[in-house]
Structures are given as C-alpha cells and as structure tokens.
Image (tube, coloured by chain):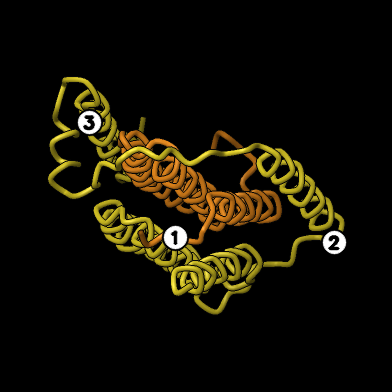
C-alpha cells in the first residue's frame, strides 16, 4: 500500500485547511476571476475528502471516486459559464471588480 | 516512511501555494499558483492509487480550467496590474472567520474515531471505472453519467449564448 503510515486524519486536516484558505480568499478578493479561483480551491479540497473517505472507509465501492469525477465535470462547466459571464461584464463595465459592478441593468 | 515524506511534501505544496493563490496581488501569478495546487492534488490521488482520477484532474483541472482562467485574465486585466490590497479590517475579519471555521471543523473531525474498513479494495483501474460508469446494475453509475452529459451540453450552449456578441439589429431595438 502506498498510504501505509498515513492515517485518514492527515488527509482531512489538509483538505480542511485548504477549504478555509479558499473561504478566506473568497471573502477578501474583489476581482471576479480571483474569486472564481478561490471557489476552485474549495471544490478541490472537497474532492480530496471524497477520495480519502472512499479509499479508507469504503474500499469495496467506488462512490467517492465517482463523486469526485462528477464534481470535476461540474467545476469545468461552472468555470466555462462563469468566465463567459465575466467577459460579458467586462465588455459592459470595463472592469471586473465587484465594487465597480453594481448595476444589474446597463 | 517514503510514503509519509511524499505526503508531507505534497501537502506542504498544496497549503503554501493555496495561501499564495489567495494572497498574491498579481492575478496571473495567482493562476499559476493555483496550477501548482491542482498538480499537487493530482499527486495525492496518485498516492491513493486513483490513477484515472489523477489523470482526469491533470487534464480537466490543470489543463483545461487553468488555461481558461489564464485566457480570461489576459482578456480582462493588464499583465502588470496589481490588485488593490484588501482593507485591514476586512482582511482581519475574514481571517478570523476562516481560522475559527477551521478550528471548529478540525476539533469535530479529529474527535471522531474513524475505523478503516478491512475489506478488499476494488482496484480503481480504468477497466473497473469504465465498467461501473456505464453499468445500470448495482454499484453502477449510468444515471449520474447521463446527468453530467446533459449538464455539460447545457453549460456549453449557455456559455455560447452568454458570450456571443449581440448583432446590430438586436441593439437597435
């Protein structure tokens, strides 16, 4: 086993810290693209959790792995749509800072 | 022993570059740091022997999403532009919220006693993954597979509709 000597808790600690670093970034950033990057960090930390639980607690099934695969697909779809929206906002406002984009109708 | 060294190396890369991703003031650098985080995560999947998942992580996340993000950065901001610093009060409050949340979650998680299952593992080889993905029997995942295909189609159409330019006729209305 390649995970010999590494208890499950280590993975959980790493993913928890990564999750809250993402939360911190989401709260402090003002640029829409950097906020999107914080969301990617959060999604990624959740994936680590799913995979670690699958590998340690339910090795006879593959649910964790499929959850992760589907989260990756959803993240890709979400990034594509979000970036389309961001570029559209940039066309209309010439800026993607959240405090400058304060009108819904342009 | 080697496993542990490798794991600590990967987690150190993940944590250091996560912090840099959310704190650096240059947007393009943040994207590159995010790339390092995603590659190190793929390394953790390799360590858990989820080879297919690690390959998907490398191609879709590190290859696809990061390139998409870098393109949109180049389209929307000047390359030497620095993001303004967050105000001290906002940064302090956000850090407080993040640290408090992390402590709460870690205390809860570490108190729980996880007992690893001593059951034989299904080897997550590409063959097994592919069989399970299109199987509709027990432990088959045909339904999520179909759902994700519809989602991807909808996202593709949505991205095209949102990003396309309005024609002149529509603007005159």
Q: Is residue B169 shown above or below B30?
A: above
Q: Is residue B162 visible in the rendered structure shown here?
A: no
Q: Nearer the viewer, mark 1 or mark 2?
A: 1
Q: Which residue is drawn at 42% across and 61% down?
A: B44
* Secondary structure of residue under mark 3: helix
Image spot of residue B1 (x, y percent)? 48, 72
Image spot of residue A60 (x, y percent)? 31, 35
Question: In this orientation, which residue lies closer to the viewer: B160 or A94?
Answer: B160
Horizontal side of residue B140 vs B99, given as left or right:
left
Query: Real-space Cα distance between discs 1 and 2?
Result: 44 Å
Label the yellow chain with its letter.
B
Rate crowding at label 3 as few (under 14), some (14 to 19) or many (20 or more) other CA atoms within 10 Å. some
Mark linked to residue B145: 3
Question: In this orientation, which residue lies closer to the viewer: A81 or A67?
Answer: A67
Image spot of residue B79 (x, y percent)? 50, 76
Task: Write down the residue under mark 1.
Answer: A4
Name of the residue lying farthest toward the front: B118
Question: In this orientation, which residue lies closer to the viewer: B72 or B152?
Answer: B152
Mark linked to residue B88: 2
Query: Real-space Cα distance between discs 3 and 1?
Result: 33 Å
> Which picture quadrant has residue B84?
bottom right
């Amino acid at each position: 086993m390649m995970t010999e000597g590494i208890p499950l808790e280590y993975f959980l600690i790493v993913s928890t810290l990564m999750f809250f670093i993402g939360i911190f970034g989401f709260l402090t950033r003002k640029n829409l693209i950097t906020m999107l990057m914080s969301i990617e960090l959060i999604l990624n930390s959740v994936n680590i959790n799913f995979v670690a639980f699958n590998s340690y607690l339910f090795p006879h099934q593959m649910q964790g792995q499929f959850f992760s695969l589907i989260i990756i697909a959803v993240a890709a779809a979400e990034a594509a749509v979000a970036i389309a929206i961001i570029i559209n906002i940039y066309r209309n406002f010439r800026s993607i800072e959240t405090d400058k984009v304060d009108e819904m109708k342009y | 022993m080697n496993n542990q060294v490798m794991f600590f190396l990967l987690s150190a890369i993940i944590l250091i570059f996560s912090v840099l991703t959310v704190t650096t003031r240059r947007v393009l650098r943040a994207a590159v740091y995010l790339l390092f985080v995603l590659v190190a995560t793929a390394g953790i999947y390799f360590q858990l022997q989820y080879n297919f998942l690690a390959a998907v992580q490398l191609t879709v996340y590190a290859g696809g999403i990061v390139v998409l993000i870098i393109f949109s950065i180049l389209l929307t901001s000047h390359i030497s532009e620095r993001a303004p610093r967050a105000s001290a009060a906002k940064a302090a409050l956000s850090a407080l919220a993040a640290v408090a949340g992390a402590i709460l979650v870690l205390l809860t998680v570490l108190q729980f006693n996880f007992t690893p299952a001593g059951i034989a593992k299904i080897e997550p080889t590409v063959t097994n993954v592919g069989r399970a993905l299109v199987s509709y029997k027990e432990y088959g995942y045909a339904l999520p597979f179909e759902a994700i295909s519809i989602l991807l189609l909808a996202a593709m159409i949505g991205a095209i509709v949102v990003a396309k330019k309005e024609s002149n006729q529509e603007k005159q209305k």
